[in-house]
Image (cartoon, rainbow, N blue to C red):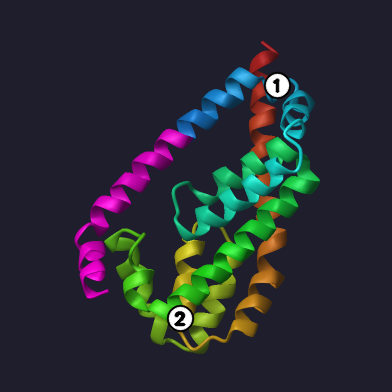
Amino acid sequence: MDRLKTLLKTYQKLVVQILSIIGFAVIIGIGIFIIKSDFFGNPAKVQQWVAGFGSIAPLLFLALSFTQVVIPVLPGNVSTVVGVMLFGIGLGSILNIVGIFLGSLANFWLAKKYGRPFARYFVKDDTYEKYIGWVNKGKRFERFFVISMVFPGFPDDFICLIAGLTKMTLKKFILYFLLCKPITLTIYTLVPLYGMSYLYDLFHSF
């Protein structure tokens, strides 16, 4: 076990770099898919194509959303926008919320169980150093946690790991997350989606 920990620590920076490269490649792939599928020109056609895969499609996306939270390869808003594009606003939003909630819950539990070594593994050193100081701030961290769940710009996945390092109970974690995240997640998904749709229509109007 100690040898495994040593190996993980040794290759931590390499793992983060590889994940960043994979994430960049996936984003490019998603961009190519959007362009080639003419999603904004005919979104129903794309969603009909996805529906052809049956129940396996939403289950695979749910698994992807969960994994993306625990092992962050893509920026979170990229996967949520893709979810709504592929499954529509209703089912796509539900899959996003459930997948991210389960992944965040896993992060909280894993940090409780394995401590700081696990919490810092998938993040860059500067991100870790910037936020880890919140661990010992008690009620102030709880307020910070709520703010980070409501407003964009925070590394939500890592902050859920930090929550697991504090004295925050599982019940409080679930309460704060479910009160704050679903509505804001939906808003921050739809705004860029409709923004891209508007730009698409504007571009094709010339």
Image side of residue 136 versus residue 98, left or right = left
Q: Are marks 2 and 1 in contact (CB under 8 Å)?
A: no
Q: Main secondary structure of the magenta part?
A: helix
Question: Label 2 belongs to which residue?
Answer: 112
Give the x, y percent position of residue 93. Answer: 73, 50
The amino acid at mark 1 is: Asp
Q: For the point 52% across and 55% down, which residue is it?
A: 67
Numbered disc 2: secondary structure: helix
Marks 2 and 1 sit apart, C-alpha to C-alpha, by 48 Å
- Judged by depth in the image, the label closer to the viewer, 2 or 1, is 2
Q: Residues within 10 Å of mark 1 (few under 14, many from 20)?
A: few
* Placement of 1 over or under 194, stated as above or below: below
Please tell me whether residue 21 belongs to the stretch shown in magenta: yes
Residue 181 - label: none
* Placement of 158 over or under 201, stated as above or below: below
Image side of residue 158 versus residue 190, left or right = left
Residue 206 figure quarter: top right
In the image, the segment drawn in magenta is 1-26
Q: Is 155 in front, or is 1?
A: 1
Q: For the point 53% across and 23% down, which residue is it?
A: 32
Give the x, y percent position of residue 180. Answer: 67, 68
The amino acid at mark 2 is: Lys
Numbered disc 1: secondary structure: helix
Q: Is 47 in front, or is 159?
A: 47
Give the x, y percent position of residue 57. Answer: 69, 40
Residue 201 - label: 1
Give the x, y percent position of residue 101. Answer: 63, 64
* Placement of 144 over or under 197, stated as above or below: below
Q: For the point 31% across and 45% down, which residue is it?
A: 18
